[in-house]
Amino acid sequence: MNSDRQSAKIVQIDADHAGQRIDNFLMSQLKGVPRSHIYQLLRSGQVRVNSGRKKPLYKLKLDDKVRIPPARINDELSVTIPDSVIKLIEESVLFENDDLLVLNKPSGIAVHSGSGLSFGVIEALKQKHPEQFLELAHRLDRETSGCLLIAKNRTTLTWLHELFRDESRSDLGKYYLTLVAGQWHGVNTINASLKKSLRSGEHMVEINDQGQHAVSHFETQKIYDQYSLMQVKIETGRTHQIRVHAVHAGHPVIGDNKYGDNKMNQAMKKLGLKRLFLHASRIELPAHHATSGKALVIEAPLSSELQSVLKKLES
């Protein structure tokens, strides 16, 4: 590999990076360089794979030789993530081995940068462990807390992506706890397709037969005077799925400022709830080498804030 800063370097793709999209690979290689500039390098042919041009969606193959041109890092866009945030994330580890890292993601921290955010969980982890392969296996909304899976090698990442895409898997379980408005009794399955739209300049998700297939199973855990604590098992992982399905059923998620009931949200703020009451409480994974060859069940406890709100509802 030629590491001269003033000249291009040639990187040969190893097993950890095989299968990765070239634009994402370049982001990891050219730290601090804006994504728009990386796309410009690809379009102009300054980045080459085996001496040929490639589009951003090209997936790298084992032993591909990638020419990476010198690129100036924009210091203004380089972000140093506070030690307090990194410490909070490190204290949220639920499970870790050589292949997999599972966090109890705190509410209010995005999983990655973008949409005006300079960093997220994955950037914080990479800042702390710059030489370690770390990639998100799935997403959680910024305000949603709970189980977040991060792959520590390409093989595990590919397995998790395939697992989450296969909606027929009965040995995969993704469970959430949510507090909703009104008394919702029993078990209710919401099977309603979801479609993203732009409404008054804001990105929204709505029920639409032309959208993506989405299924959520709601089961009552506890009934309060005006609220219900529900466990939700999702078969699909669409954006805002639980929140939109809950509204569709007439029981919006408490603390949801996008789709929820403003009057009830204000009432709950007086009880100390300052966030969305949606928590990825449990994940069940089938046996795989990333789970040490055994089926794995990981549970994420509710934060003290959410537990305190529930206790106040009981009094």
Image: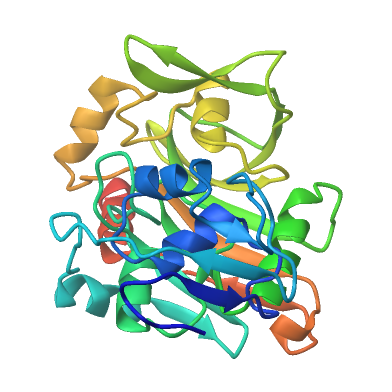
Above or below, 76 against 62 in this view is above
In the rendered image, the vertical position of residue 1 relative to residue 276, given as above or below: below
Report the side of 143 relative to 39 (left or right): left
Residue placed at 43% from the left, 85% from the top?
Answer: 131
Q: Is residue 315 visible?
A: yes
Q: Position of residue 125 (x, y in %)?
A: 36, 75
Q: Where in the figure is residue 83, as x and y percent of width and height?
A: 16, 77
Q: Position of residue 231 (x, y in %)?
A: 58, 49
Q: Quadrant of residue 179?
A: top left
- Camera-nearest residue between 193 and 1: 1
What's the residue at 39%, 23% (across, down)?
259
Which of the two residues, 145 or 79, is positioned nearer the viewer here?
Answer: 79
What's the colour scheme? rainbow
User: Of all residues shown, which one is farthest toward the top?
Assistant: 200
Residue at 60% x, 21% y is: 195
Residue 141 image point, x, y percent: 42, 46
Q: Quadrant of residue 200?
A: top left
Tell me if residue 184 comes above or below residue 39 in the rendering: above
The residue that appears at 20% across and 62% down in the rendered structure is 78
Q: How many marks?
A: 0
Instruction: Pick the residue in front: 123 or 185.
Output: 123
Q: Nearer the viewer, residue 283 or 223?
A: 283
Q: Is residue 183 above or below residue 34?
A: above
On the question of residue 138 being in view, the answer is no
- Quadrant of the rendered structure where residue 227 is? top left
